[in-house]
Amino acid sequence: MTPRDWPTVREIYAQGISTENATFEREAPEWEAWDATHLPSCRLIADEGGQVVGWAALSAVSGRCVYAGVAEVSVYVAAQRRRGGIGKQLLRALVDESERNGIWTLQAGIFPENEASLAAHLACGFRIVGKRERLGQMNSHWRDVLLLERRSAVVGTETER
């Protein structure tokens, strides 16, 4: 993903926001704000015939050095291309890219109603580690969020001495 991809990436993000089952966000940010909160190394797009149809990226979960290998996943697919396997392809590629960049744990927060995202994450080796009940309000309704994680089998398996 590059800054020139941002207009289409932002539109896909806005489409996800409009479902009210993808994020607590109300609107897609400008490039500068998004860029500042996502890791520079793990930003992917799905391209079909020169058209961006999906994207995936990671953001740090903490600025503390002990969490340097832990990141949160974002995956979004264009509305007209959903349920075609693009999200799962992006997620698999993101897992590979994260491991090349030293990430040992990926986490995701998913609304229970977002069954497609939940299924894609589970198919890519994530597991549900908890349910955060009434985590936030959206349109005056409390929303639960499932917490998922995927541990790398290759990164972070050694113990420091």
Image (spheres, rainbow, N blue to C red):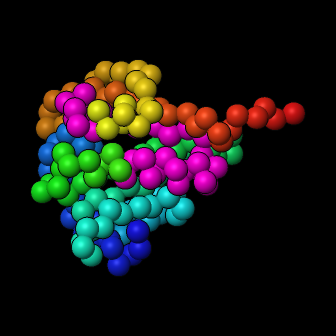
Quadrant for residue 122, please give it: top left
Horizontally, residue 19 falls left or right of residue 10, namely left
Q: Position of residue 13 (x, y in %)?
A: 25, 57
Residue farthest toward the right in the current orientation of the protein: 161
Residue 112 within the segment the image draws in magenta: yes
**From the image, which quarter does the N terminus lie in?**
bottom left
Q: Measuring 69% from the left and 45% from the top, which residue is drawn there?
A: 65
Whether residue 41 sits left or right of residue 146 in the image: it is right
- The range drawn in magenta is 90-118
Give 34 or 45, whichever is nearer the viewer.
45
- Residue at 14%, 38% (x, y): give it: 139
Above or below for 26 versus 125: below
Front residue of 75/87: it is 87
Q: Nearer the viewer, residue 8 or 60?
A: 8
Location of the C terminus by quadrant is top right
Image point (42%, 47%), residue name: 92
Question: Residue most toward the bottom?
Answer: 4
Q: Position of residue 36 (x, y in %)?
A: 47, 63
Check if residue 116 falls in the magenta segment.
Answer: yes
What is the total number of numbered labels drawn onto the structure image?
A: 0
The quadrant where residue 114 appears: top left
Question: x, y (%) of residue 80?
Answer: 12, 57
Q: Tell me: 47 left or right of 32.
A: left
Residue 113 visible (yes or no)? yes
Where does the image place residue 88, in percent across and percent down from the top left? 33, 45
Asked if residue 63 shows in the view, the reply is: no
Residue at 78% across, 32% down: 159
